[in-house]
Image (cartoon, rainbow, N blue to C red):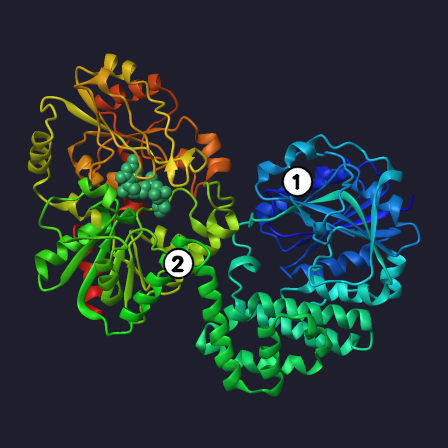
């Protein structure tokens, strides 16, 4: 029962550290030394971590700046005094008896491993179940990421130690790339001077593993789940995950491979492992590395160079195309390699395409698109789209209308989702169905794409097309890379962030409504091209002199009573409440019966749901009082006719503030929303330019209070200065001049 030193590097991961530490504090094996290396975390993360350091078995050290995980783990090894060492990551956790089971079984071996379970969402974590023995000896056994149902897991009991199955590994495959979940004797570590390579940012685990593998004959793996590995939840802005493009990772990997080769080429076990890693890396990454023509020469040389020390016998079991490619790399025949690689890439695309009719269709479409896009772009052709073709609205519409009035020689089209045809004018606006053949021709030849949301990622932007991304709101809710955990259905945090990153690579210009948004957009979208800080084109309308006439015309056209004041209710959507992918739920928490009783004589209410919300409200009983304008083409019209806005965390209030009319924030779920669901960029409760309320009664009270002229003018002005001061009715003009006219 020797002491175990658990080594945990920590870098800005305060969302998960409590779970991690609790899982150690409650280990059934008490003889622990818990070494935590704070690797230059920011003040907030540091303070939180430090508040949790209550156990006197903890040794806590800080790096002055962020030095990387290899450095931190090495430091941990220097500090460790236990008989055993064990690495744990600060966003992972252990099962209740993990250490006990590992220590029990290590016996005379220098190293032993347990098994891992993946946590994809934080809610998958079941606090502290005991390790459970796995008795199926399935083909997956080599893969330490297993998928089992949570139920089975939660019911896990302490295994009878004698019953635990053990597998002894003598060779190490390229799947073994993690130092986590290995219990190691410290004497062994020190005798072999095992340390992590600090010269690269990635792949440092393998630098430790290769040393271990070079020094052992056999690695026992007990078939007991001991470790929860969190995947798919990228802590905000962890550069390791998304910002490290394939080029950088390739350079890191090859550097490490060459370096380790020098040291271990005489050790068969280690050499074998390294070469398998190289093969694995090549097979996973080659097509991504060589797909980009500009990278070709550099990476050809790099990889061909690395192969000088490769053991060619390993190739025998590889597929034919890999053998051929490696052959050309070895001969340094770049032309033949290039041709083979092009074929490989094309064949792979084709194979993916043939999987399903839908992917085949897309493949053919994409090829046709690329073919058309080879022709020159038409400098007068502009394609517009708003909210994925669902609306004729927002910034794209304002820019469109400005151009139409002032530069009528442009050929302009609106891309529409045919299911939303009724949200577009009957005539006067040229419409084209998204993904139709005509759309393909227009999109592939247009000089400009103007949109406020994302484009399908599989659609290759033509080389000379300029993509103007207007976005659709000043952010209060955390955006894109700034989101901690993405709860939307049909994606994971990792996938979402990666896709967002790819999407924003395509943008050439981004419109920003104010300096506050500029700063956020730069970071959250990882955008370093031109930001046009112009104010929002969609808000130009507020600065026209005919707002009253417009309101009157609108009310008459839609049969709204002219003698009543108008309340607009426009809430946002909830990431974690949905019917299916892309269709979100909205409980109407506002009690319309009460509202009508209390306010009906003076007011009507217009309901406007977010475009992602798919909900049909039964408004029959409230005829003459409540109206559903969720499908109306553009919310700007509704702002103009309303006398008061009720919203929540939606960016609508940044726009509405331009009108300097009263606002109420109906935030019945604020704690949950500002916490787990999204998180905010500023202290909303302090800065909101109007009362914050949680119940219908409070809404009614607030409406009455505001209608007596109690407008919080000071807050409203402060808010206006911060978010609306660029708005003057000329934002569209500024965008057109900066983006369209300059690039014709
Ligand atoms: N919107 C609307 N009706 C609503 C809510 C929003 O028409 N009930 C429109 C508004 O133009 C708003 C935009 O959709 O500005 C974006 O809506 P948000 O509620 O802010 O939500 P989201 O689409 O998540 O965008 O940077 C801004 C954020 O990305 C928010």
In the image, 157: left or right of 667?
right
Splitting the image into 4 quarters, where does residue 544 fall?
top left
Which residue is more in the foreground, 51 or 204? 204
Q: Is residue 316 above or below residue 99?
A: below
Report x, y in % for residue 677: 47, 37
Q: Which residue is mark 2?
A: 360
Which residue is more in the foreground, 458 or 585? 458
In the image, 156: left or right of 668?
right
Secondary element at tag 2 = helix
Q: Is mark 2 within 8 Å of ligand 1?
A: no
Which mark identifies residue 148? 1
Q: Is residue 688 above or below residue 73?
A: above
> Which residue is drawn at the image coordinates 91% and 46% (left, top)?
2
Report x, y in % for residue 165: 83, 44
Secondary element at tag 1 = loop
Distance, label 1 to label 2, CA atoms, is 33 Å
Residue sitting at the far top: 597
Q: Residues within 10 Å of mark 1 (few under 14, many from 20)?
A: few
> Which residue is drawn at the image coordinates 25% and 19% (left, top)?
704
> Which residue is drawn at the image coordinates 50% and 68% (left, top)?
288
Q: Is residue 545 above or below residue 216?
A: above
N-terminal label among 1 and 2 = 1
Q: Is residue 150 above or below residue 68?
A: above
The quarter of the image holding the C terminus is bottom left
Report x, y in % for residue 529: 36, 65
Which mark identifies residue 239? none
> CB of mark 1 within 8 Å of CB of mark 2?
no
Look at the image and tell me whether residue 420 can be seen: yes
Report x, y in % for residue 400: 16, 55
Q: Residues within 10 Å of mark 2 (few under 14, many from 20)?
A: some
The quarter of the image holding the N terminus is top right
In the image, 243: left or right of 452?
right
């Amino acid at each position: 029962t020797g002491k175990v030193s658990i080594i945990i590097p920590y870098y800005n991961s305060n969302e998960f550290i409590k779970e991690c530490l609790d899982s150690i504090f409650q280990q059934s094996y008490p003889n622990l030394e818990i070494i935590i290396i704070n690797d230059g975390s920011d003040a907030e993360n540091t303070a939180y971590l430090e508040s949790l350091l209550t156990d006197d078995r903890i040794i806590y050290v800080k790096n002055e700046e962020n030095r990387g995980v290899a450095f931190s783990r090495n430091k941990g090894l220097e500090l460790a005094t236990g008989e055993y060492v064990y690495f744990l990551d600060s966003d992972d956790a252990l099962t209740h008896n993990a250490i006990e089971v590992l220590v029990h079984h290590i016996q005379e071996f220098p190293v032993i491993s347990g098994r891992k379970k993946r946590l994809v969402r934080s809610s998958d974590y079941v606090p502290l179940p005991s390790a459970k023995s796995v008795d199926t000896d399935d083909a997956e056994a080599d893969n330490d990421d297993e998928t089992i149902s949570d139920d089975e897991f939660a019911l896990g009991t302490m295994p009878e130690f004698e019953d635990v199955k053990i597998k002894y590994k003598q060779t190490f495959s390229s799947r073994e790339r993690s130092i986590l979940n290995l219990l190691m004797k410290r004497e062994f570590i020190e005798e072999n001077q095992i340390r992590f390579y600090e010269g690269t940012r990635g792949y440092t685990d393998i630098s430790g593993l290769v040393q271990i593998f070079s020094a052992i004959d056999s690695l026992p793996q007990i078939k007991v789940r001991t470790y929860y590995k969190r995947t798919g939840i990228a802590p905000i802005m962890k550069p390791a995950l998304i910002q490290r493009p394939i080029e950088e990772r390739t350079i890191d990997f090859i550097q490490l491979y060459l370096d380790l080769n020098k040291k271990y080429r005489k050790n068969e076990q280690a050499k074998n492992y390294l070469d398998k890693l190289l093969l694995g890396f090549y097979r996973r990454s080659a097509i991504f590395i060589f797909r980009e023509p500009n990278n070709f020469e550099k990476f050809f040389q790099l990889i061909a160079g690395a192969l000088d020390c490769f053991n060619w016998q390993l190739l025998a079991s590889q597929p034919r195309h890999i053998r051929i490619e490696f052959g050309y790399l070895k001969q340094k025949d770049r032309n033949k390699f290039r041709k083979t690689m092009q074929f490989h890439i094309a064949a792979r695309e084709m194979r993916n395409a043939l999987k399903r009719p839908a992917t085949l269709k897309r493949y053919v479409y994409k090829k046709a698109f690329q073919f058309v896009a080879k022709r020159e772009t038409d400098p007068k052709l502009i394609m517009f789209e708003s909210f994925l073709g669902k609306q004729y609205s927002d910034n794209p519409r304002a820019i469109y209308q400005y151009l139409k009035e002032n530069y009528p020689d442009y050929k302009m089209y609106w891309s529409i989702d045919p299911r939303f045809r009724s949200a577009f004018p009957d005539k006067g606006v040229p419409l084209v169905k998204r993904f139709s053949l005509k759309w393909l021709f227009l999109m592939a030849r247009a000089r400009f794409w103007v949109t406020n949301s994302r484009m399908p990622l599989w659609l290759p932007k033509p080389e000379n097309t300029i993509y103007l991304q207007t976005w659709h709101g000043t952010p209060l809710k955390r955006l894109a890379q700034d989101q901690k955990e993405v709860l939307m259905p049909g994606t994971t945090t990792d996938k979402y962030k990666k896709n967002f990153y790819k999407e924003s690579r395509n943008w050439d210009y981004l419109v920003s409504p104010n300096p506050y948004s500029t700063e956020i957009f730069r970071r959250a979208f990882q955008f370093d091209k031109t930001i046009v800080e112009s104010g929002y084109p969609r808000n130009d309308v507020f600065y026209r002199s005919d707002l009253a006439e417009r309101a009157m015309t609108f009310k008459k056209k839609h049969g709204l009573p002219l003698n009543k004041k108008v309340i607009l209710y426009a809430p946002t959507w909830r990431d974690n409440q949905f019917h299916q992918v892309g269709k979100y739920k909205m409980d109407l928490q506002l009690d319309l019966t009460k509202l009508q009783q209390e306010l009906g004589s003076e007011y009507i209410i217009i309901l406007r749901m977010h475009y992602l919300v798919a909900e049909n409200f039964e408004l029959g009983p409230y005829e003459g009082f409540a109206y559903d304008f969720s499908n109306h083409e553009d919310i700007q019209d509704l702002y103009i006719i309303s006398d008061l806005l009720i919203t929540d965390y939606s960016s609508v209030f940044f726009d509405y503030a331009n009108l300097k009319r009263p606002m109420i924030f109906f935030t019945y779920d604020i704690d949950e929303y500002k916490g787990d669901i999204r998180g905010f960029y500023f202290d909303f409760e302090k800065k909101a330019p109007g009362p914050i309320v949680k119940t219908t009664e409070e809404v009614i009270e607030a409406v009455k209070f505001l209608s007596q002229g109690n407008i919080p003018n000071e807050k409203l002005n402060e808010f206006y200065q911060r978010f609306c001061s660029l708005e003057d009715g000329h934002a569209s003009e500024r965008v057109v001049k900066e983006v369209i006219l300059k690039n014709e």
